[in-house]
Amino acid sequence: MRERAIIESGQTALGIEFGSTRIKAILSDYTGHVLASGAYDWENQLIDGIWTYSLDKVREGMQSCYAELRRNILEKYNITLSVVGVIGISAMMHGYIATDAEGRQLAPFQTWRNTNTLDAAAQLTELFSYNIPDRWSVAHLYQRILDGEKHVREIASVDTLAAYVHRLLTGKHVLGVGDASGMFPIDTEKKDYNERMVHQFTELIADYGYPWTLRGIFPQVLAAGEDAGCLTEEGAALLDPTGTLQPGIPFCPPEGDAGTGMVATNAVAPRTGNLSAGTSIFAMIVLEKQLSRVYREIDMVTTPAGDPVAMSHANNGTSDLNAWVDLFRAFAELTGHPVEPGEAFELLYQHSLAGDSDCGGLLAYGYLSGEGITHLEEGRPLFVRRPDSSFTLANFMKTHLYTSLGAVRMGMDLLTQDEGIRIERLMGHGGMFKTPGVAQRYLSAAIGAPVTVMETAGEGGAWGIALLAAYRMCRKPDETLGDFLKTGIFAELPETTVMASEQDCAGFEKFMENYKKGLAVERAAVNSF
């Protein structure tokens, strides 16, 4: 009855996140309690060498996952959802969506997975004395300029996916500072694009004579808690074609999946961090100060509140691992004993615990695309073993779980060893952590420190953006995002902390030795096949 009353009164937060393999909607109350959810599965496509999604699928997927949410609410509470208290949009960071003054798409949507911006990223890094990764929006924009693409002159807006969807629903061209920090470097004092670098970019492209400015085509930057507009009549009709959802609902600033991951794990304070494991895997460490020098392997981004964050981002996470699980499920079906996806992951992940601590000498790379940390422009999924390796199912599964952490671990080494950064609290979240005690233990072995996972670890970024939406509505005067999360959301949530054994840690170190040596094999595969 309490939940029915909350939904009927509209004291709720709706979070929608566009992940790499799923669009998910979550409706929660203002304390983060999940009331209902909906989802839509999708997948990126490699078209003419570009990893992309159709913007028609963006609309279709959003409508579908919201429709499933509505159905769940009707079935569970006998309520037809017509109003919510606040909405937030989150999506994969980075990338490039260019539209003209009429909102028409000018070029293929380039996702974070593309590494076709090497020249632009290198030139901008040198110009700014600040690392500009391949997947950042400004690198995509400048590469389009270097390549002489005609559509650049017609650009009226350049967006990330979150900014694009938010504008469809509200008409506002704005973006949360965390997601904006993956478009262009941020001045963490002003919580806005770095003005020195904006001026440098303006001078860099001056001779092209474009009719736009960077600030004119990039979204306005907003910090967590700020007003980001309201649902328009057109936006309401787009999100809910039945016409039931009412316009006028306020929005929080749209954010990227990195920021919502930080929020969903309460990792927004200095010396805290989280590792988000999915199609890509990235570790985020909130800093007390800027790094001592530029690292091409480390992104400098921000929390949704605008505080500096060092990110070790690996383009390739669990996609190849998921493909192997699907292969085993196909075999199970052939035997006449089909296995549901969740059960298959549970069985195989748990069985991996029986493997050798160093994976028995097996080695794999789940590189479906290029990998910035290991300096590969393209990828080839690869499994390799020596004749004397211990080729068992347990070692095979452990190898694919370990290797999903390999590249991100190399980036983390730069922070902990070269920069001496202390991590007091590392949280794991994302689908990889749904099976209790497995990926959590392996991540602890990888970093040599305790790893905490909450019961909400599998909720992901849709829950994180719902919490940011709740903060937009409920924060007290001068209440920081960190204080709101600590006292209002996470104070009583159950969590589990695991520390890997010395044997596990030593085994992961041995695996990493093989991982680094074997990169020559991966490079040879890219060059030859």
Image: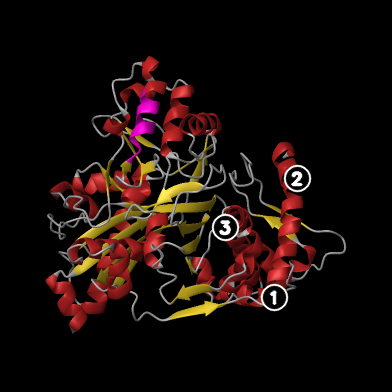
Which of 251 and 81 lies nearest the eye of the viewer?
A: 251
Give the CA separation, mark 1 to mark 3: 22 Å
Give the SS element for disc 3: loop
> Which one is earlier in the sequence, the residue at label 1 or at label 3?
3
Q: Is residue 215 left or right of residue 333?
A: left
**Residue 208 visible at all:** yes
Amino acid residing under circle 2: Ala
> Which one is earlier in the sequence, the residue at label 2 or at label 1?
1
Q: Tell me the residue at 54%/32% (across/down).
A: 122
Which corner quadrant holds the C terminus? top right
Give the SS element for disc 1: helix
Q: Is residue 465 above or below residue 165?
A: below
> Does 196 appear in magenta?
yes
Q: Position of residue 407 (x, y in %)?
A: 62, 53
Q: Nearer the viewer, mark 2 or mark 1?
A: 1
Q: Nearer the viewer, mark 1 or mark 3?
A: 3
Give the CA separation, mark 2 to mark 1: 29 Å
Q: Position of residue 160 (x, y in %)?
A: 36, 43
Q: Which residues are magenta?
A: 193-202
Q: Are marks 1 and 3 in contact (CB under 8 Å)?
A: no
Q: Is residue 105 above or below residue 390?
A: above
Give the SS element for disc 2: helix
Q: Which mark is residue 520?
A: 2
Q: Is residue 529 left or right of residue 407?
A: right
How crowded pointer 3 is (Cα within 10 Å; few <14, some 14-19, many 20+) is rated as few
Amino acid residing under circle 3: Gly
Which corner quadrant holds the N terminus? bottom left
